Image (cartoon, rainbow, N blue to C red):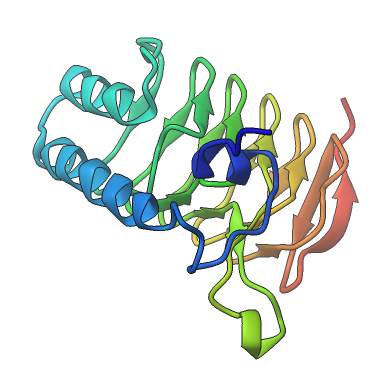
């Protein structure tokens, strides 16, 4: 049986070790992304920014996607963006585990989407545990919120500013706090 590429294995949820024979590829890819990201963060118009982000995520972005720079991402190829998305200044995406952002999503400044974590056991702490993040349609994520690996934010929901979301959020729900808890339901 042929071993698949480390990026595919991460996207499939495999925990990977720094001693993996392909671990070096993670740093190589991150520095390639950083080179494009540097150009993107120096760009001064929306079309140019979309072009560079499209190059990073390996997909043409819809003209309705707006990103205010600076923006930070470690890999990019595991991020999928829908239409009419607004990503404000200084956001961080760690996407080795996968990030999907559907249509009509608002992401405030300093939001972190972290699809990667590490084991609790200190002997394995340098391993990566990837789990996807899925942001469904019409979500608003408040400033300085952090969404952790394995979380889905349900359609029409709101994540309050400063929240740390460790568990999936049902649709039509406002969550907030550390860790985020349900504050109220949204009537639709």
Estimate the x, y position of residue 82 in percent, counting from the top left: 54, 18
Q: Quarter of the image containing the C terminus?
A: top right
Horizontal and vertical percent position of residue 83: 51, 15
Coordinates of residue 130 in the picture (x, y in percent)? 64, 53
> Against 90, is 104 above or below?
above
Apparent side of residue 82 relative to residue 118 in the rendered image (left or right)? left
Q: Residue at x 77, y 29 (%)?
A: 155
- What number of labels is visible? 0
Above or below residue 61? Residue 17 is: below
- Relative placement, left or right, of 38 versus 106 is left
Residue 119, position as x, y percentages in the image: 68, 75
Look at the picture and state if 87 lies above or below 178.
above
Quadrant of image for the N terminus = top right
* Quarter of the image where one finds residue 185: top right
Q: Nearer the viewer, residue 133 or 161?
A: 133
Q: Which one is nearer the viewer's eye here, 142 or 151?
A: 151
């Amino acid at each position: 049986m042929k071993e698949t590429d480390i990026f595919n294995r991460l996207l499939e949820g495999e925990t990977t070790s720094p001693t993996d024979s392909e671990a070096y590829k993670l740093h190589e890819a991150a520095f390639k992304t950083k080179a494009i990201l540097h150009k993107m963060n120096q760009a001064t118009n929306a079309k140019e920014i979309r072009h560079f982000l499209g190059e990073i995520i390996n997909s043409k972005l819809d003209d309705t996607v707006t990103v205010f720079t600076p923006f930070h991402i470690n890999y990019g190829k595991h991020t999928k963006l829908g239409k009419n998305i607004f990503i404000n200044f200084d956001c961080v995406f760690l996407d080795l585990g996968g990030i999907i952002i559907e249509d009509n999503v608002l992401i405030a400044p300093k939001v972190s989407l972290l699809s990667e974590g590490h084991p609790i056991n200190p002997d394995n702490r340098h391993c990566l545990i990837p789990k996807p993040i899925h942001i469904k349609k019409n979500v608003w994520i408040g400033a300085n919120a952090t969404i952790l690996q394995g979380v889905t934010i349900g359609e029409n929901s709101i994540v309050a500013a400063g929240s740390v979301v460790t568990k999936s959020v049902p649709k039509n729900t406002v969550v907030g706090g550390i860790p985020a808890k349900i504050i109220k339901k949204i009537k639709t």
